Image (cartoon, rainbow, N blue to C red):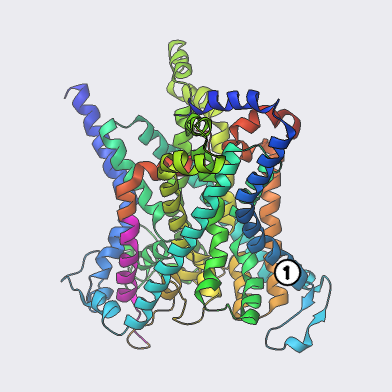
Amino acid sequence: MSPKSKSRLGWTLVALLVLGYSLFPVAAIFATSFKTPGDLGNQNFLPTSWTWQNYEMIFVGDAQGLFLSALRNSIGITLIATFIAVVLATLCAYAIARLEFPGKRIILGVALAVSIFPVISVVTPLFNLWRTIGLYDTWPGLIIPYLSLTLPISIWTLSAFFRQIPWDLEQAAQVDGATQWQAFRKAIVPLAAPGVFTTAILAFFIAWNDFVYGISLTSTEAARPVPAALAFFTGASQFEEPTGAISAAAIVVTIPVVVLVLLFQRRIVSGLTQGAVKG
Amino acid sequence: MSTPAVPAAKRRAKAGKPAKSERTRAEARLGWMLAGPAFVIMLAVTAYPIAQATFDSLFSYRLTTPDEREFVFLDNYLLLFTDWTFWRAFLVTLLITVVTVAVELVLGFALAMVMHRALKALRGVLRTAILVPYAIITVVAAFAWYFMFDINSGFINSWFSWVPGISAELDWFGNTWTALSVIMAAEIWKTTPFIALLLLAGLAQVPEELVEAAKVDGATRTQQFTRVIIPNMKAAIMVAVLFRALDAFRIFDSVFVMTGGDQGTEVLALLAYRQSISRLEIGLGSAVSVVLFLCVLLMCFAAIKLFNVDLASGTDQSQAKGKNGGEDQ
């Protein structure tokens, strides 16, 4: 074997190893989601006969009420929280990247502090407050705390992106008579859009992933998001574990994430690392 | 990529200094107008609740009997610090943090090296694959691992029955150590990609000439790695380890899904949840929350003091260049 084909073989093996590492648990729950109730106890990786039964259960069957409302809540709450965070963070990051003003470092420092903040530490007072003022088990009751998850990462990532924009364009626009605000809107926003989009994806992942707020600040289908609902699935009878339904629901909520990763992996990686390491 | 930004920033710094104070003030006003809302919201959703939690932790306060609320000063903390349940949760949390971060650092380095050296054609595939665990919902990952190991539906027992100690009757979640092992495995699987990507970004910063020079001077592969590559990406390693350690210390989802804290696997976050949300013991739950928060704060300060990590310098390059000397001691 020539050294070249040897190294190619080596790389193929390494790549397969990495693929196996990343996809194995996903493949396992994927296979489980197509098992019949009889297959669930057979201790095999693959189902003996593939069935849509579990998906029927969550979309049109018994678990429908629980799952569909949770899916609606998750999508709605996550998108709104992402949107608000990205809009506010865009303004904030523009100021940090472009303007000289006292307190810049404080803002970045606070964003960092909030991002390492243990969610569980703020959930008790919020739980108490939300019950008093009627935000418990509502969409805004989750959207507001989700901002503590989505804002910091948005500010950091966007500040990093904005530092790389050729700002001469803005100056040129200002020379041509545009105000600073106009220059921002007309010259910079189109250039900044990719960074903003990447940030939105990262913020979406984080909000989509939330579990602590989801189980603590909701109690019914009115606002409970999918990760929290998964923990409340029950089997057809008391003695039956809802393994199949949970697996099917898990696959459904994983699909959007995988699609985003497939489409935008390059951007996601640059967004993720820019915020934390000099780039 | 960053080259156009540097001269622009320099030019600005030069042009900015002699600017009139009127303009400076207008710029500051605009700056705060744009950054203000985000800043205020961040403070409102974290600073206010933690202050409230600190206040509540000084009371004996049960939501079921709100009228019997009573100021007890530090009694809640005293109760915690003399209770084995708290210390066990603390130790379990610490154990999970240390083990997962250590394993993830090694595994993450391996993955980063693979991606760094990989043929161009493979890089995209590898990056996509590695992003899947990162992007997947933690609860989903926890269920995936739970079902794999579950005594009824799992296939791990039958696949690995040839390994001594593993048999069809092994209930992974019926024993502290096996349960913790699965929980940690799931955490490691899910979060190693994050570390790997940060380390990959750090690897890209190591000047290729340095490695070449070491090679020419006859350094072995190990020497190249320990003497050249690692010292040159110390900052990236520190940031990755610190972020992951802080994140690991807050572990909740996987434990909740897999054991619910049974079999001595309860972690601090779960203890806080159980006290305040399940048992409505707001006072005691708040005390646990505050302790958890202080631990995270302490870890952060320790890292900054011990290793001199300037986290803010990551994105704040233009500022760091000018001001670092005075601010970080």
At x 61%, y 30%, the residue is B318
List x then y, in percent, for residue B265.
55, 67
In the rendered structure, which amino acid carries the disc numbered 1? Gln
x, y (%) of residue A270? 43, 40
Q: Residue furthest top?
A: B217
Is-magenta flag for residue A257?
Answer: yes
- Residue that label 1 marks: B52
Magenta-highlighted residues? A239-258
SS type, badge 1: helix
Is B258 above or below relative to A173? below
What chain letter is assigned to the residue under label 1?
Answer: B
- Foreground pick, A193 / B186: A193
Q: Tally the numbered discs.
A: 1
Q: Main secondary structure of the magenta part?
A: helix
Q: Is residue A76 visible?
A: yes
Q: From the viewer's side, name the closer residue of A211 and B164.
A: A211
